[in-house]
Image (cartoon, rainbow, N blue to C red):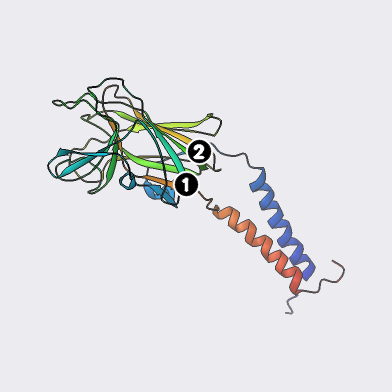
């Protein structure tokens, strides 16, 4: 039996038609709302904020072999890649409260982050357990909006609470808000602290707020993981690839009158 090969013109037109159809579907799909991220790796970070890298503040001892760096209630700095951001924590207007501070997780401060993590802490009134603390929220503004951001969250001296993360665009419109039950530090330094993140299909996350349901307990977060650039979805890659094949075919074949 003699097999007839497809007409080159037909092959080219099919490839272009499929590519254009897929591209049209992807282009015309309505943008989805922001979504919740509960695993750090799902941020697919290409930038971060490590609170331990801040080069300002007043260092004081708070526990054996532990130093805290006292911070202002509002400050600005740069991410690892050099993008500007600002942090704002409400001032309780009470001299009994410490200001916000940063401390490193160690055996003398057995919170359920990872050993060595630098934790941004909202401040509290040093006293017996449970200590009254500044509940925040922690508000972080990005000078350049991002696709995704997240961090692990802990609440001081609390074993049952919900943690919240909310995202806003550059006009301060709420993009979305999510909450999950917090994870208490029952086993000490085990990296079990709840991770909360938020992701968008466009780089429109200009501000996030982090808070909890505890009205009188301090809040702590470890480093921020940030996604600044778009990662194409597999369907987008497929459409572009098919279009590419169509264009390659048009250059390598002589297509009669097509």
Label 1 Cα neighbours within 10 Å, binned few <14 / some 14-19 / many ≥20: some
Picture residue at 85% right of the left edge, 71% below the top:
256
Q: With respect to residue 129, does 197 lie above or below?
A: below
Where is residue 18? Give x, y as percent.
69, 57
Dot 2 lies on which element?
strand
193 to the left or right of 178: left
Residue lying farthest right?
A: 257
Picture residue at 31% right of the left edge, 26% below the top:
135
| Mark closest to the chain's N terminus, 1 or 2 | 1
Label 2 Cα neighbours within 10 Å, binned few <14 / some 14-19 / many ≥20: many
214 to the left or right of 178: left
Where is residue 54? Give x, y as percent.
34, 44
Dot 1 lies on which element?
loop
189 to the left or right of 251: left
Q: Which residue is mark 2?
A: 205
Kindly identify which numbered label has been placed on residue 202.
none
Q: With respect to residue 22, does 110 lie above or below?
A: above
Residue lying farthest top?
A: 94
Where is residue 134? Give x, y as percent.
29, 26
Picture residue at 53% right of the left edge, 34% below the top:
169
Camera-side residue of 221 and 180:
221
Q: How many numbered marks are there?
A: 2
Kindly identify which numbered label has been placed on residue 83.
1
Residue 138 falls in which quadrant of the image? top left
């Amino acid at each position: 039996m003699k097999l007839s090969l497809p007409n080159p013109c037909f092959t080219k037109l099919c490839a272009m038609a499929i590519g254009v159809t897929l591209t049209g579907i992807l282009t015309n799909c309505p943008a989805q709302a922001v979504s919740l991220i509960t695993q750090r790796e799902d941020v697919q970070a290409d930038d971060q904020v490590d609170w331990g890298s801040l080069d300002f503040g007043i260092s004081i001892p708070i526990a054996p072999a532990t130093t805290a760096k006292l911070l202002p209630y509002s400050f600005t700095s740069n991410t690892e890649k050099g993008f500007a951001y600002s942090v704002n924590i409400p001032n309780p207007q009470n001299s009994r409260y410490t200001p916000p501070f940063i401390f490193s997780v160690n055996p003398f401060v057995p919170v359920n982050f990872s050993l060595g993590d630098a934790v941004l802490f909202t401040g509290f009134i040093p006293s017996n357990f449970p200590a009254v603390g500044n509940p925040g929220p922690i508000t972080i503004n990005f000078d350049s909006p991002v696709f995704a951001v997240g961090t692990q969250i802990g609440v001081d001296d609390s074993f049952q609470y919900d943690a919240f993360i909310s995202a806003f665009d550059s006009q301060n419109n709420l993009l979305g808000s999510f909450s999950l039950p917090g994870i208490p530090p029952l086993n000490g330094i085990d990296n079990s602290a709840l991770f909360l993140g938020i992701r968008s299909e466009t780089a429109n996350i200009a501000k996030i707020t982090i808070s909890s349901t505890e009205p009188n307990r301090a809040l702590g977060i470890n480093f921020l993981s940030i996604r600044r650039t778009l990662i194409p979805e597999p369907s987008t890659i497929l459409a572009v690839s098919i279009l590419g094949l169509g264009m390659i075919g048009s250059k390598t074949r002589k297509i009669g009158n097509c």
